[in-house]
Image: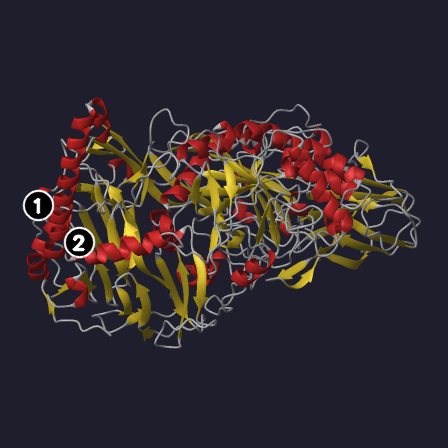
Amino acid sequence: MLEIASRTSPKQAFSHQSTPTTAWKQDIQPFSMKTSFSGYGDDNNLEAKPPICRYQAKRRLFWLRICAISILLMLVNCWLPGVKFFRAFRDIITQGNTQIPQPVISTARTDQVQFDNYTLILKGQRIFLHSGEFHTFRLPVPSLWPDILEKFKAAGLNAVSVYTHMGLINPAPGVVDLGGFRALQPLFDAAKAIGIWVVLRPGPYINAETSAGGIAHWATSEVSCTLRTNASDWKAAWKDYIQAIIDVTVPNQITNEGPVIAIQIDNEYDQAVGAQAEYFVDLENAYHESAIVVPLTYNDPGPKRNFINGTGAVDLYGVDAYPQRFDCSAPTTWNPVETYYHEYHSEVNPLQPLYIPEFQGGAFDAWGPTASGYAPCRVLTGPDFQSVFNLQLWASNAKLINYYMLYGGTSWGGIPFHGVYTSYDYGAPITESRELTIKYDELKRQGLFLRSSPDFYKTDWIADSSTGLQASTNSAAFVTLLRNPDTRSSFYIARQADSTSSATITFKLNVTTSAGTLQLPQVAPSITLGGRQSKVIVADCTFGVLSKLLYSTAQIFYASTIGGRDVLFLFGDSTQEHEAALLLTGTPNKLQNLSPLVSFTAYGSPLHQQGVSLVNFLPGIEGLVTVWDSDTQLVLFADTDTAATFWSPSIAGKAGDPFRNFWGLGTNDSILVGGPYLVRSATVSGSKLALRGDLKTDVRLTVIAPRGIRSITWNDEYVSGDLVATSALTAVGGFIGQLRMRPSLAGISVPRLTGWKFKDSLPEIKRDFDDASWRTANHTSTNIPLKPYYGDGRVLYGCDYGFCENVVLWRGHFNASGAEKSVDLSINGGQAFAASVWLNDVFLNTSFGNSTNNHNILEETDDTFVFPEGALLPGQDNVITVVQDNMGLNQTEWPNPDTSKSPRGVRGFKLEGGSFSEWKVQGKIGGYVNFPDKVRGVLNEGGLFGERKGWHLPGFPTSDWDSRPISSGLPNGASGFGFFVTTFKLDMPRGLDIMMSFFFGEAQGQPYRALLFVNGWMMGKRVANLGPQSKFPVHEGILNYHGENTVAVALWVMTPNKTAAPDLQLVLDAVYDGGVGDVVSDNPPWSSQGRG
């Protein structure tokens, strides 16, 4: 162990080191025998001289070089202590490891997207694919998609993974619609403009907690053979959709200067079944027979070895992982880390990089009164989880990681499968309402480290504590060593051996460096790991162009070059001590207000004699501290929370480069900006720096930029600087100013929802209702494998008649003899469904499906409905009316892909004492072929009378309706359906990002369901008796922030004479000064055309 001298103040340290660091500056470049000396080094000029002159000149040149080399060697030995370290560092980064084989580059269909056993290689550039999941169909406002992508990039990510939804794009056989929110071109355009790569995942099966896993509903009943196989009718069903995806994607591939770099084949499947493997072959052939050239990938649901080799094998294999699963009810109770990734990868596909197409970024939540909601999910998978589990992926040498979800969004309309409710917030780093969370802060700290650390992109897994790595002095610390085989940079990733432990532990770390074997830290007592915390301890790393970091127990937030200076930004918890050893170079600038909590070692330490400065960051540091400020380097330190307030927007490359906004390809230039809630972009034009972003409060703006910047704007407004504060930050390229929220934010409010108009929406139970236009339910066979339980041979499944989604109505006619006493009905609607039943206009009862946080699941019921005295009309036509809510079709349930052919409808019917003469069925108007609302799409509406007539659409005339507060419920305490409609105006200031929600404020448990329509879009399904959702975020674009808005609620009271009084209001969630601006609404108004 090395002897370390006592600590001195920073000023003493700088004064002690001023001479060697100034000398070091004189020889930053490694010494080379090819050094040319002015006037003597141009050998080419010798050829023009006569032979004797050439001989004499060469002789003179020889002796001049010998003298120059001797002088330089003397300088090295006498004046430059740092050169010994530099030579060792140079040797260790250039010698390589001859035992490690050269990587094998993939034989992809294009040389612009390749990979080896380490990473992706795009256009010859190695990248760490750091990605987040975003489903554009869950944010049906295309002009808000750039908001999400800008937030991805601001967190240091470089890619987005995107599912596309067959059911929305291909609503009927032969119909493909890539318009509106279904479009992909706006996504591709935004991704390219922002600098985000796209991994496209078009299925056809996507899972994603969507109805039928995204398979078009019509296919679940019209395809007779098994779904997701090589069956000819299933192939015929998906080919139009896949061809449409191909057509729009081809011109947007990286080979055509676009952002698309890979396409996933289907999702989470089993290769062992021959027909399923051949199905993958069919899909792959569709792409290979087109102009698609990017790699085809696959996402395995765990380590199942599917589609790596053999029939249907893809170009690039990936495996997903959700280590905390999906029950958020005990958010502080963890499953331990999964440690199989590296070993599994080494065994099954060692010539490819370790790819995690889905890693847990949150969790979906289930129906039921004991369901937790998403706030606990954000704790379960919060910053602690991200620190331990994300870094365990790094420790496994994964270099392609996608977090599912990074932004979840809204499963509006009929999008969700029956196991989840409307919100798909997912407890993700970005909330459903598009706000940033503390999870986002941790993701940004990780993301900017990865973006700053190209040495980390190519590493060999050396060993860990379970395979003989003797690095930690405390067995409670588990350490993995990764090393770059070219630069020899080392990364020690440390966590607690008991990954679930919330205790604090300390340890020392034995490391091998270019300066020899060291035990870290050298001065501080130990390295500290808080409960559920991981750290990356680096050794022999480069920051910026040439600066050397021997080691650091502090974490790296940013390491790059700004304005010709190498910049290193370290951070660590303020309750812990941290240490770094680095070569400080250049002429130091005068620092003011140096922190007494930053300590340098005195002369005499072995490392100092090699030119290495030891810096310790004592507990208690809060805020940003300048550690070293010279003409060649800037070193900063901040506590963990302060680091999260900083951003590093990239500066676009050359104007003519189509990849000018892509980090690592078109640009490697960036700046540091501290303070704002969000920094979206930075643009340099001459001496002007233009920043664009969002504010949540007034903040101090801190900028580290190129030295030539003379003025700074924030959202096009000039910012004045504080010279005194700036001088304490850095003498070169620094700026400190103040940003203030604009006055227009004051007094922003939302109107109360009043003036409700009401109309009954169940005329179907009246004697004079005419259902002649309804479809006759007379099928006696079905492609749905789960057959009816009982009846007379007729099949009453909604999908068989074109009505798969949302509310479906059934009317069973019979001529009563008077002997009929009851009806038995088996009704299938999925988890948390309900079905209310009437005999003529007399309410009989409601069948309730169930789910209690994914327990006590009841997808279908089998009940007897007894006829009350006087309800039957002997000798006349009587009608049993069943109104059922379809909660979405099942996803694939292993091992049967046909589980998506869900038998939603009536699985059994029996009239005691009689028989039915005719059954009629009605869902959304027009079914999936002729539905009139092509903008909002096939999944937006159901079959309620008011929906069929368009009562939910803006502009429907309600002047002759009754005035009735929605909180009064239905008249006379009845069960049934009623539509409540009101309008309100908004006139929000421009230049703001304003988040709003609709909130049902009454206590949970009332026996009603409500469909919430906002300007015609079904943005919420409220199930008040089960919950848990009572708040429904709705974005600008759905809401018209500069005009009139229509809110319609279809209220379904399921139990008579019980309180069913929704207290619905519009609430203001947050206001930010900024946003993407120019949000476009596409909310077509009511028209009678196609509405019957």
Colouring method of the image: secondary structure
Please state which amino acid type lies under the numbered disc 2.
Leu
Which quadrant of the figure has residue 59? top left
* Image vertical order of residue 783 relative to residue 1028, above or below: above
**Earlier sequence position, callout 1 versus callout 2:** 2
Q: State the CA–CA distance, disc 1 to disc 2.
A: 25 Å
Q: Hey, which quadrant is residue 875 in on the image?
A: top right
**Residue visible at 72% across and 30% down?**
929
Which sits in the foreground, 420 or 892? 892
Q: Disc 1 designates what residue? A: 724
**Foreground: disc 1 or disc 2:** 2
Which residue occupies 60% across, 32% down? 292
* Image coords of residue 989 (percent x, y): 33, 33
The mark total stands at 2
Task: Give the position of the N terminus as an image quadrant.
Answer: bottom left
Could you say where residue 714 lies in the image, as x and y percent from the top left? 25, 35
One can see residue 170 in this view? no
Identified by mark 1, the residue type is Val
Q: Which residue is mark 2?
A: 584
Residue 53 lies, in percent from the top left, at 16, 27
At label 2, counting other C-alpha atoms closer than 10 Å, the crowd grade (few under 14, some 14-19, many 20 or more) is many
